[in-house]
Image (cartoon, helix red, strand yellow):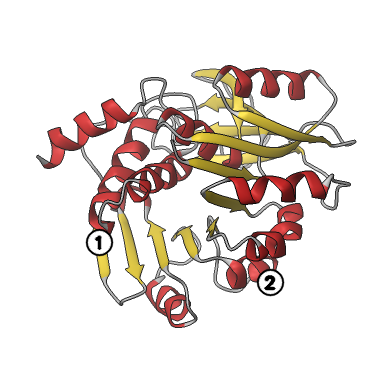
Amino acid sequence: MPRALVIGGVSFDTLIRLNRFPEPRSQTVFSQGYHETLGSTGAGKALNLRKLGFDVTLHALVGADTYGQRIEERLRHEGIDFVRDIDPRGTERHVNLMDSDGGRISIYMAHATFEPELDLDRIKALIPTHDYVVLNIINYTRRVIHAVRNAGKELWCDLHDYDGRNPYHADFLVAADCIFMSSDAMPEPRPFMEHMVRSGKKLVVCTHGRHGSSALTSDGRWIETPIVPGYTVRDTNGAGDAFFAGFLFGHSRGHPIEQCLRLASIVGALCVTSEELASPTLSPELLEAEYRRHFG
């Protein structure tokens, strides 16, 4: 069983479904329903990886409050080894407005401490015992980059909607071996991806929502992968993290890049059919069956 260490990124979220986003004026809006659940990028990756058969450790900040307790209980129920530090500001919380086209407006109603006090030695001790180290772009995680390097581990990093200029991402850009990102803030990502590969990255993958994904390998192969059709979109939260987990599943089994991207697309598609960060039905067996159904 491959072992993955995911560092950074949990919250407790309220998701509110709307037919369409309201106009920017005073008004009363009636929702089409709401849902409260575990959120954020670290939780999304950890949940999907666990359902795909990984032994997962997740480190994140939570508050000494009811929301932190609910997060911890859920993660442990899913079989994830949750290693936490307490945030004195309390558990990070989001309100996500979701429209019928899959759009999202995310409101940070309570955000985590930017420079928290941590038991860094405890985090660093986890690194050598895991096959994969996934660093999310939460500010505190940059403090373990050197420990990942010293342990000789590849660093997998998700830049999300990086715009190509934001200095906040600089440490992660330099350190990462394998980069994932979306094109939401970078409509023409290929020059940036080529620059990353020239600078020594082993792999750069960019997702484009309903327009699929692009990947550039260290040997210069450019691979375009469409989305997998036939899945009803209910909630797009977590789709990028599910995509990442599907790719890592394929990679851990030694599959070629093309197959990894197809597996990633399926896991992302399964994710958006549910209100959770990972499809409740996700498993290695289901993923392989869906792969055969779509690709033979």
Instruction: Residue 11: give x, y in percent of width and height.
Output: 68, 33
> Looking at the image, can residue 40 be seen?
no
* Quarter occupied by the N terminus: top left
Q: Is residue 296 above or below residue 214?
A: above
Report, in whole angstroms, how far the alpha carbon at label 2 lies from the one at label 1: 28 Å
Across and down, in percent, residue 24 comes to: 62, 42
Task: Say what amino acid the circle numbered 1 marks.
Answer: Glu
The residue sitting at 61% across, 26% down in the picture is 38
Q: Position of residue 175 (x, y in %)?
A: 61, 68
What residue sits 47% from the left and 72% below the top? 201
Of 164 and 32, the residue lying toward us: 164
Q: Residues within 10 Å of mark 1 (few under 14, many from 20)?
A: some
Q: Amino acid at mark 2?
A: Pro
> For this rendering, which residue is in front, 197 or 92?
197
| Helix, strand or loop for disc 2 | helix
Q: Closest to the observer: 193 or 234?
A: 193
Q: Are marks 2 and 1 in contact (CB under 8 Å)?
A: no
Left or right of 134 on screen, residue 118? right
Badge 2 crowding class, 10 Å Cα cut-off, few under 14, some 14 to 19, many 20 or more, is: few
As drawn, the label of residue 224 is 1
**Residue carrying label 2:** 167
The location of residue 252, given as percent across then percent down, is 38, 47
User: Sequence-wise, which precedes: disc 2 or disc 1?
Assistant: 2
What is the secondary structure assignment of the residue under circle 1? strand
Q: Quadrant of the C terminus?
A: top left
For image coordinates 25% across by 47% down, the residue present is 262
State left or right for residue 182 relative to residue 14.
left
Quarter-wise, where is residue 215 in the image? bottom left
